[in-house]
Image (tube, rainbow, N blue to C red):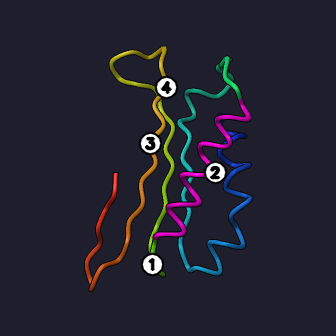
Amino acid sequence: MKEICQGCAALFRDKTAKRKVRLNISVDASIDGVEMIVDGRRIKQILYNLIDNGIKYNKPGGTVSVTVEKLMEDPNQLQCRLWWKIPVSGSTRMIL
């Protein structure tokens, strides 16, 4: 999962620099080496679309964050969250 997230982030380096938006990727180290049965192409497509929208609808100085971690309730499941912060007249609005 870490490789998938980092691969997606690499695709947006130029776009984030051009739009002055920060992209944060955080993958919990405890899931390193965990074997997952997923359609990697679809996961990449979902992440790409969500990150792209986060950058596209953000403002200069905003942040797009992707976090992947184990669920506290069930350590056999992973949770992936994506959110972005958009600066609004001196304050920050968070979209979940």
67 or 37: which is nearer to us? 37
Which amino acid type is shown beneath numbered disc 1?
Lys
Residue 78 is marked as: 4
Nearest-to-viewer mark from 4 and 2:
2
Q: CA distance from mark 3 to mark 4?
A: 10 Å
At x 64%, y 28%, the residue is: 32
Q: Residue sitting at 35 percent across and 77 percent down?
A: 87
Where residue 35 sits, quadrant-wise, is top right
Give the residue pinned by disc 1.
59
Magenta residues (range): 40-57
Q: Which mark is residue 48?
A: 2
- Picture coordinates of residue 27 (x, y %)? 56, 40
16 lies above or below 41: below
Mark 2 or mark 1: name the one nearer the start of the chain: 2
How far across and down, in percent of the image, does residue 60 sit?
A: 48, 81
Q: Is residue 26 above or below residue 68?
A: below
Per the model, the C-alpha gap separating discs 2 and 1 is 18 Å
Which badge, 4 or 2, comes first in the chain's sequence?
A: 2
Determine the image quadrant of residue 86. bottom left
| Secondary structure that dominates the magenta span | helix
- Magenta-colored stretch includes residue 53: yes
Give the residue number, with chain letter if any, for mark 3.
Answer: 81
Image height of 88 relative to 84, above or below: below
